[in-house]
Image: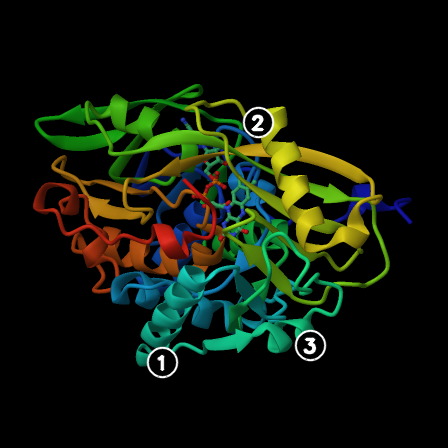
């Protein structure tokens, strides 16, 4: 089947960097590529480069468990993630790229009375924001997931769940590739294998980026580097309220279809879905130490597998195929930073922690607006860096789904 692969068309160009761009996006993950795409498509800014130290989408975008949902508690976060979910719903058509976006629904399980009270509160808040969200009892959960252990004998009995039918999963690589191809077609330069090693700032204004291939000038620079955001901030002489942690995931050998929705449990602490090729995709909590290695520790794997077997005892003999880690940048309030900085022309989009994949389209959309207008998009405004000075934090630890 690969006989003629050398004749395949390139999906995007491999350009030599120009001396000066209107906007340089540092980081070619999903968020950076989406930002570049919306800058060119909706903001009329076409002289844009994305500078990526490795290959496009090789960071957390390639490493995540692809859960998409918008059932966050507070209005600010709910609006941001719902904005993104609405963009997901038409994105394969818009990019003419099959993102395998599958709205198979997401369950967040409750295992005790306090869990259920929190679920009822969050579902009510979601409904007030027009987000599809329901409270299910044990039978409702069992009907959706027949193989989940909902018996009274379970150590952590399933008392119910929140259910968002429009949530689901998408194909992670395809999102990066779809945005990359579309941005390239709009004239964006995608510059891979080029590491940003410094930010050139003169008289309080950004002038461009120092890279492993020399200086590239930029009127504006947007940093979208996930786990490396603290490092980029350091280059600008700033300190970000962020910690970088390893976060792991794993997949099993492929098995026949047995789970057709997404199941998350904060209490036993694991989450699971099944990919279209049959692998069980299993996510863990962060490793508690700070680190920049894209790998985690063994106890977290053991803990996660115990949680999954607690929920699905029939999986006890399924073999795991692969496991890996990414570096996630977590904020004290488990919400992102989408913000201008005190340095003119320098912007940061970071702090998505364990849950930014679902936000990829929305994050790129509001960040492009923020950069192009030098003023926050209304949905992005509450996620300003200034909230750590004013104290207007948006505490989403409960809805983040993975313990920080
Ligand atoms: P990335 O994809 O990491 O892109 C940042 C890019 O910046 C990288 O490609 C990197 O190489 C580049 N870069 C860094 N430093 C430099 C530099 N100096 N110069 C040039 N380039 C640089 N989110 C969900 O919504 N649902 C989930 O189910 C989910 N599961 C997850 C599971 C795991 C194991 C992990 C690790 C994360 C998970 N997430 C999930 C979080 C999600 O993956 C991230 O929030 C999101 O992908 C961040 O996207 P990004 O484009 O900002 O980052």
Q: Tell me residue 327's x, y (percent).
A: 48, 32
Q: Earlier in the sequence, mark 3 or mark 2?
A: 3
Q: Nearer the viewer, mark 1 or mark 3?
A: 3
* Residue located at (37% from left, 46% from top): 48
Q: Tell me residue 336's x, y (percent).
A: 32, 48
Q: Measure the alpha-carbon separation of dots 3 and 2.
A: 35 Å
Instruction: Choose between 368 and 265: the one closer to the eye.
Output: 265
Q: Tell me residue 198's x, y (percent).
A: 31, 21
Element under label 3? helix
Element under label 1? loop
Instruction: Choose between 68 and 158: the one closer to the eye.
Output: 158
Q: Quadrant of the rendered structure where residue 385 is? A: top left
Q: Nearer the viewer, mark 3 or mark 2?
A: 3
Tell me: residue 316, above or below residue 45. Answer: above
Q: What residue is disc 3 on?
A: 143
Q: What residue is disc 2 on?
A: 296
Q: Is residue 300 left or right of residue 40?
A: right
Q: Is residue 88 left or right of residue 172?
A: left
* Residue located at (53% from left, 36% from top): 59
> Mark 2 and mark 1 in contact (Cβ < 8 Å)?
no
Tell me: residue 78, above or below residue 28. Answer: below
Q: Earlier in the sequence, mark 1 or mark 2?
A: 1
Q: What residue is disc 1 on?
A: 130
Residue 9 visible to an observer of this rendering: no
Q: Earlier in the sequence, mark 1 or mark 3?
A: 1
Q: Measure the alpha-carbon separation of dots 1 and 3.
A: 25 Å
């Amino acid at each position: 089947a690969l006989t003629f692969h050398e004749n395949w068309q390139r999906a995007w160009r491999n350009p030599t960097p120009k001396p000066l761009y209107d906007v340089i996006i540092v980081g070619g993950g999903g968020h950076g590529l989406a930002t570049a795409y919306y800058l060119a498509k909706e903001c009329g800014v076409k002289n844009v480069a994305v500078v990526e130290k490795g290959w496009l989408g090789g960071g957390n975008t390639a490493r995540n468990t692809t859960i998409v949902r918008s059932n966050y508690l507070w209005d600010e976060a709910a609006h941001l993630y719902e904005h993104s979910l609405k963009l997901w719903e038409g994105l394969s058509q818009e990019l003419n790229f099959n993102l395998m976006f599958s709205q198979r629904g997401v369950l967040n399980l409750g295992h005790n009375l306090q869990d259920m009270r929190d679920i009822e509160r969050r579902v009510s808040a979601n409904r007030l924001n027009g987000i599809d969200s329901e409270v299910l009892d044990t039978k409702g959960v069992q009907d959706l997931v027949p193989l989940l252990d909902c018996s009274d004998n379970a150590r952590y009995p399933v008392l119910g769940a929140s259910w968002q039918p429009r949530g689901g999963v998408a194909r992670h690589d395809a999102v990066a590739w779809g945005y990359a191809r579309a941005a390239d077609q709009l004239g964006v330069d995608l510059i891979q294998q080029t590491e940003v090693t410094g930010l050139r700032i003169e008289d309080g204004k950004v002038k461009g980026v120092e890279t492993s291939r020399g200086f590239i000038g930029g009127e504006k620079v947007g940093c979208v580097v996930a786990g490396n955001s603290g490092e980029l901030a350091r280059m600008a002489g700033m300190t970000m309220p962020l910690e970088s942690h390893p976060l792991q995931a794993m997949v099993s050998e492929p098995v026949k279809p047995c789970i057709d929705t997404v199941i998350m449990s904060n209490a036993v602490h694991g989450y699971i879905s099944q990919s279209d090729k049959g692998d069980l995709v299993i996510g863990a909590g962060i490793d508690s130490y700070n680190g920049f290695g894209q790998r985690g520790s063994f106890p977290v794997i053991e803990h996660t597998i115990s949680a999954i077997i607690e929920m699905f005892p029939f999986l006890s003999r399924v073999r795991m195929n692969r496991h890996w880690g990414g570096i996630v940048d977590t904020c004290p309030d488990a919400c992102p930073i989408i913000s201008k900085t005190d340095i003119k022309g320098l912007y940061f989009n970071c702090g998505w922690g364990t849950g930014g994949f679902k936000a990829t389209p929305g994050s790129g959309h509001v960040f492009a607006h923020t950069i192009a207008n030098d003023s926050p998009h209304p949905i992005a405004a509450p996620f300003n860096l200034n909230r750590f000075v004013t104290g207007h934090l948006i505490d989403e630890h409960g809805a983040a789904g993975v313990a920080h």
